Amino acid sequence: MRRSSEDTKTAILAAARERFAADGYEKATIRGIAADVGIDPAMVMRYFGNKEKLFAAAAHFDLHFPDLAATPRERVGTAMVLHFLDLWEANEALQVLLRTGVTNEAAAERMREIFATQLGPLAARLCPDPATAPARAGLAASQILGFALTRYILRLPPVVAMTREEIVAWLGPTIQRYLTE
């Protein structure tokens, strides 16, 4: 049975997400992804051009920010930290993107795009001066990404040992300040 080009592209992206999550960027190969889909590697190249472009297409993440309209303003930092903890702990692919983004420009660009297009507008809605929203979003991202790097990638023992409550107590006020004060 033949697949449509759209079905083939969708299958390639699904296989790429699984392969990048399981093997990481460096070990995942076009050949392995093609084998997972049951197609020739040339088909992967036809649709995506190269491994970096395939990774960028496969690394689509919606950060699914909570609706903060009902959250008391003084609890926004706490809500955001809890939300990011849930994201990092539930989504190994996001960890792969962070790990890869440290050494690969395409992955780093994808991470910048995700945070700029998703966290930036949220910061603009929350902060007192929308002109400062990009800087505020960048600072909030530095805290969230730095924390994720030390806890989930580098696995620094004191950070790994922290409870959710401790993490919120430490990071919540900082994120709160960046976004609302």
Image (cartoon, helix red, strand yellow):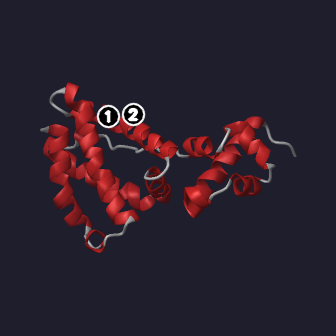
Residue at left offset 30%, top offset 52%: 144
Above-or-below relation of 115 to 32: above
Above-or-below relation of 166 to 36: below
Residue 67: image location, x then y, percent: 31, 40
* Callout 1 touching callout 2 (CB < 8 Å): yes
Res 37 seen here = yes
Residue at left offset 61%, top offset 61%: 27
Above-or-below relation of 94 to 111: below
Q: What element carries label 1?
A: helix
Res 62 seen here = no
- Which label belongs to residue 117? 2
Residue 119: image location, x then y, percent: 33, 38
Q: Where does label 1 land, which residue?
A: 120
In this rendered view, identify the residue nearer to me: 76 or 48: 48
Query: Mark 2 Cα within 10 Å, few/some/many (few <14, many 20+)?
Result: few
Residue 32: image location, x then y, percent: 71, 58
Residue 10: image location, x then y, percent: 67, 43
Above-or-below relation of 173 to 50: below
- Which label belongs to residue 142? none
In this rendered view, identify the residue nearer to me: 116 or 84: 116
Residue at left offset 18%, top offset 42%: 178
Residue at left offset 23%, top offset 40%: 70
Which amino acid, mark 2? Thr
Q: Residue furthest right?
A: 1
Task: Give the distance between the C-alpha atoms of the residues marked 1 and 2, in whole angstroms.
Answer: 6 Å
Q: Is mark 2 on a helix, strand or loop?
A: helix
Which amino acid, mark 1? Gly
